[in-house]
Amino acid sequence: MSDDRLPHYVNPAPYRPGMAETLTPAQERVFLASQWTLIWWKFRRHKLAVISGAFLLLLYLSTLIAEVIAPYDLHARHTDYLFAPPQPVHLFHDGDFVGPFVYGMTVNLDLDNMRWVYAEDKTQVQPLRFFCTEGDYPGATYSFWTLFEGDFHLVCPAPGGQMFLLGTDRLGRDMLSRIIYGARISLTVGLLGITISLLLGMLFGGLAGYFGGWVDGCVQRMIEIIRSFPELPLWMALSAIMPVTWGPVAVYIGITVILGLLDWPGLARAVRSKLLALREEDFCLAAQLMGAKPRRIITRHLLPSFSSHLIASATLSIPSMILAETALSFLGLGLRPPITSWGVLLNEAQNINVVALYPWLMLPVVPVILVVLAFQFLGDGLRDAADPYN
Amino acid sequence: MLGYIGRRVLIMVPTLLAISLIVFTIIQLPPGDYFTSYMNELETRGETVDPDKIAFLKAQYGFDRPLYQQYLLWVTGMLRGDFGYSFEYDLPVRDVVGDRLLLTFIVSFATILFTWMLAFPIGVYTAVRQYSFGDYGLTFIGFIGLATPNFLLALVLQYFAYVWFGTSIGGLMDPEYVDQPWSWAKAMSVLEHLWIPVLVIGTSGTAGMIRRLRANLLDELDKQYVITARAKGMPPLRALIKYPLRVALNPFIADIGNLLPQIISGAAIVSVVLSLPTTGPMLLRALQSQDMYLAGSFLMFLATLTVIGTLLSDLALAALDPRIRFGRTEAS
């Protein structure tokens, strides 16, 4: 029998069963990477999301040192310069390079229209100073986080000069400084609100998804009812409840609570549907068969699996909170001076005169748009990266 | 189908009851009531107020009764078409509200139409020409619309409408038509003013709608039956319209439930800025002056409008989409 075998090739090397599946180092790296590493790799490919994330990180860091970045103190009033238009920054004077500077302003009262008329005074060259500690102009000193006094600024006007790069408002306060300070409130309102909303969403969504049955039914009905309210009128009604006697901090906390209270249904739905789907997964069943207790299954297996989705959904609902705060403050129902948020600043741009005469009062809308877009792009990127096994 | 309609209408009843309870709680929560603040205001002005009249009004509107009775009075009154009394205007709520409900409805309806008309061609275009220059450009504009606060857009557009077209500022019609009976000229004047609020309120909803239509259509275009149709030589336009587009159109109807609260929210703030004679500005004032029945009726009306809109969109979806069964399915 063995003699009439057809000639054929036999590999002389000894047979090793695992050989065919040997992984290249690169493949091994991917297969052994943790979930969060995979998410990071996938997220990194979204250029727009990465840029947005970096931009937001920078903004949030800047709120920590708003006093240093802003050239003037938040409440510093320049009574000689009411409704002053933005001063453009020049580099060349009479064809000579002088570095960044602004021209001084001459002020005239237009008695026919009863408004101040500002003109650039080309003879006054006021070079900007950088990293200045002199504190020799009005509004230079601040109290850093209300802890200690300081007068160090990244950039400040020439001695005796002005620097209103974005103009001044009705009381002669520098818009640029106020926008920088306003970021503190506007950016944190969304974060605090989303924290409340996340806690509520995880609680109710978790209850509905884990217990199912009538608990699920109740939560679902509750969500339907809350969602059938038009948000803004409800926000308006709830903010109107807050007594006018409340201090600024109480109002700030109240607004964030209101924003969070009405935002959770969306997150609760996401948690619920994810929990319902994950409960049926094989790894969950395996854990159950190996004797894991519900608590361990939830914390070790379920929670890590959907936390990435949750972060993505939460990021996507921050923009609506920032916009809502802006809208409420604009209407005068949200935050109130002396708290300064972008919405409070826009409250000054209430009527059509502003559009016609002092359009720079609408500038706080620019950071609002940028931040909302950045959160949107970041959230989109996170959502795509949240499921790295796809 | 009839059973499905019946069930959906029945579910509305507890929903509306729960909403009325929430609304009542909200309008009751501020400390004091309208009469307290009214009397304080008169006293600070040094005027005297007839305590008998206040006591009579309080008794007539049940302010002296326990809360649950007040609630029952309010709800049963609404069922009979009596929405309570506006203390600030000294008129029944129904007479104060008047045309405003109709105009709110017109603005909302026009906005939905606008959203559809804009989102449909753009959504189809961006899906068919995915990753093209036009796709990126239109998506970007949509994002900007999403991110710009409505009220500021309204303010700026109003200014330019005045400068370029001479449209009168504020309101939903030229001043000479206010309080006039409806006529052709008045309707045209309303149309002339309507585009600003519709455009402003529509921008945010349109962006979302475009994105959903695009995503749905892209999913559908990747399916095998489309590839088969193309392979067999079906012209591209027909291969797009015959089935994929019809399937992808679902969000247009299903989304009314999401769109309507958004539009009504947007309308509220935009009409404050543009001082439109709709419910928004009056609601704001009623909330500030604790004119509780007026505020409550507005909130109730807006929520009811949303609930009915959602119901209609569910019914339309069930009628149009054969894949939807009439069983107890949870639409997510």
Image: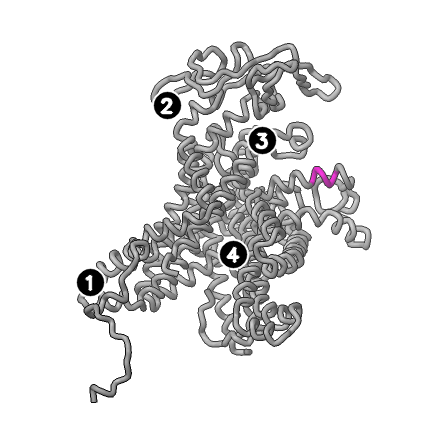
- Return the residue at label 4: B74
Q: Secondary structure at mark 1?
A: loop
Q: Is residue A61 magenta?
A: no
Is the same chain shared between marks 1 and 3?
yes
User: Which comes before the other along the chain, label 3 or label 2?
Assistant: 2
Residue A134 coordinates in the image, percent (x, y): 44, 11
Position of the C terminus of chain A by quadrant: bottom left
- Label 3 and label 2: CA atoms lie apart by 26 Å
Residue located at (67% from left, 58% from top):
B117
Q: Nearer the viewer, mark 4 or mark 1?
A: 1
Asked if residue A52 is positioned above or below residue A78 in the image, the reply reads below
- Return the residue at label 2: A146
Q: Which mark is residue A348?
A: 3
Is the same chain shared between marks 2 and 1?
yes
Report crowding for label 2: few under 14, some 14 to 19, many 20 or more residues within 10 A (C-alpha): few
Q: Identity of the amino acid at label 2?
A: Thr
Look at the image and give the residue range highlighted in magenta: B158-162
* Residue B234 in view in this figure: yes
Report crowding for label 3: few under 14, some 14 to 19, many 20 or more residues within 10 A (C-alpha): some
Residue A357 coordinates in the image, percent (x, y): 68, 28
Task: Determine the residue located farthest toward the left in the rendered image.
Answer: A291
Q: Secondary structure at mark 3?
A: loop
Q: Identity of the amino acid at label 1?
A: Lys
Q: Which mark is residue A177?
A: none
User: Which comes before the other along the chain, label 2 or label 1?
Assistant: 2
Task: Determine the residue located farthest toward the bottom in the rendered image.
Answer: A1
Q: Nearer the viewer, mark 3 or mark 4?
A: 3
Q: Secondary structure at mark 2?
A: loop
